[in-house]
Amino acid sequence: MKDKKALLFELNIENDKYIFPNTLSDAIRDADEELRELEDRLNETTETVKQLTPECDRVDYILSVSSGALCGILDVFLVGKPGESPLGDMTDKWFANRTMDFAKVCGYDGDNESLPSAIKYLEKKFKVPYDQSVGGGIFRELINLTPTNHHFKSLGHNPTLLGLFFSILDQFTNTSDFVSNGELISLNNSEGKFELQGKNIPSKLFCGIVNWIGHLISDVSGSSSSKGRGMGLPSPIWAWSNDVIAIKRKLNIPLNEFDKSVNELALKLFEKGYDVRFQTTQTIPVFINEIVVRMLYSIRRLIKYYITVPSEDRCWGELWKSCEPFSNATVKRMLTVAHGTFCLTDIVDATIKGVEKGASSFNVVEFFMRLNIIGVGRFTISLYGEAERGIQRSKAKKEVVFLKREKLIVDDYIEGLKILSKVYDDKVLLTFVSDFQSSDLYKEAFNKSVELAKLRNVPEKERLNSKLAIDTYFRGEH
C-alpha cells in the first residue's frame, strides 16, 4: 500500500467567516525564521557541550600525574608533620617576622630580635578577659587548662566566626568560654579588671573586633612565655569541632560520640603542634601543584598556537583564548588528576606512618598529623566541579539531540512547502483563500474549491460541494 501524504492548513472561523492565517509563502517565511532560531540554539548548545568537554590528550594526563606525584613527594619529605617539617620551620619563621612587623606598626620599639618581648607588648595592647593559660581550682579540675591546650579550648582564641562571636561576648560580659570534654563552660571573671573601651555599643563592638584580631596575631607564634616553638592558634578546619559542640550545647541538642571523638582528636593534634602555621605549610605543595599544572597547560597550548597559526594571522585575543588556564574544562580535568594523584601519594604515606607508629593498632593521630587536609579539600572541590560539569554536559547533549530532531522536522516541512508552492500554483483557483476572508463570497469560494477538487482528481464521494458539507466535515459529523 502506497503511503498517503496530506497537507494541513489551519482554518479558523471568526464572525461566520473562514480565516486562513497563512499562505504558502507566509508559511515558508515563518518556517525559515523558525529554522534560523533553531540553528542558533543548536550552535549555542553545541558550543556549550564543547566548553564542558575536556580535551585532554595522553601528554596532558602524563604531565598532570607527574605534577601531582612530585608535589606529593614534596609533601612527604618537606612538610611531613609538626616538629619534623623543613618547610614548617620556614613557615614558623615567616609568621614570627610578621608578628614582629605588626608589633612595630602598633608602636613597639623594643628589641627587634626578641619575639617574646614583641608578643608581650601585643598581649597588653590587645588585652582580652579570656586569656587564662593555666590556673588552679576550677581551671584545673573542670577545664584541665594547660599552656599547651588553652588556645584550643578557649573559644575566643579560635580563628572562626564563632570564635569572633564568643570573643565579643566575653569582652562585653567579662567572661571566659571554654570547650572541654564535650561541654561548653562559661566562667565569670568577677575579679578581673578588664574593661572594653568605647562610649557606646557600636564603638565597643569595633574595639572588641580589633582586640580579637590583634590578640590572635599576638598568639599566632605562641605566647610571650612560650619555650621553643610555642603553641599557636588552632587550625580553622579542626577548630570547627569546638564550634559544633558550642552550637549544640547552646541549642540543647544532644552530642553524639562522633562529635566528642573528633573534638578529642583535634585537641590531640593541636597539642602536638598542628596549628595555623602548620596548616599554612600544608598549603605550599598544594599551591605549587596548582600553579605547575596551569603553567604546563598554557605552555603546551602556546607552543601549539605558534606552530599551527601563521604569523600574519596571529592576534592577542586568539592567543589568550587558546592558552588561558582558568575557565576551560581541559585544565580543570588536568587539575583533578593532579590533585587526585597528590592525595593518593599523601594518603599512602600517612597510612604507612600510622601503621608504623601504631605498633599493634593503627595510630589515628599520626595519620591525621601527616594527612594534608588542604590537599584533600582541593581535590574534593575538583571532584564536585567534575560532577557538576558532567550533569550540565549530559543535559546539553540531550538538548542537542532534541534540537537536531526538531531541525530535521522543520527542514522537511520547508521542503514540502516549497514543493506544494510549485504544484499548486493555480492563482485564479487559489483565490478562494481571500474569498473565504470576505464576508459575502461564500458561494464563489465553495464553487472554486469544488473546481479545484475536480482539477486535482479528488474522488466524487470525497468532495465537499456545499457550505453545509464543509461545516459537517469539520464538525466530524460525516
Image (cartoon, helix red, strand yellow):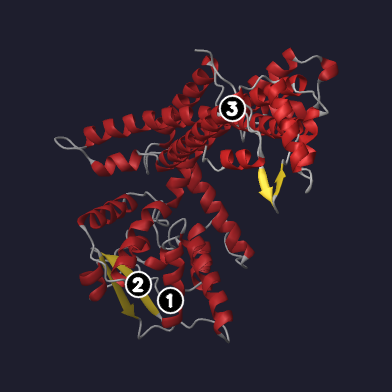
Q: Which label's residue is closer to the chain start, 1 or 3? A: 1
Please provide percent x and percent y for residue 252: 27, 71
Circles 1 and 3 in contact, beta carbons < 8 Å: no
Tag 1: amino acid:
Leu
Of 445 and 196, the residue lying toward us? 445
Circles 2 and 1 in contact, beta carbons < 8 Å: yes
User: Can you see residue 292?
Assistant: no
Quote the CA–CA distance across marks 2 and 3.
94 Å
User: Can you see residue 106?
Assistant: yes
Tag 2: amino acid:
Asp
Question: Which residue lies at the image location 63% right of the left edge and 33% below the top edge?
Answer: 464
Query: Which type of secondary structure does the marked residue at label 2 adopt?
Result: strand
Question: Which label is found at residue 177?
Answer: 2
Question: Which label is found at residue 436?
Answer: none
Question: Which residue lies at the image location 54% right of the left edge and 57% below the top edge?
Answer: 99
Please provide percent x and percent y for residue 458: 64, 22
Please provide percent x and percent y for residue 72: 43, 29
Please provide percent x and percent y for residue 151: 38, 62
* Residue bearing the label numbered 1: 169
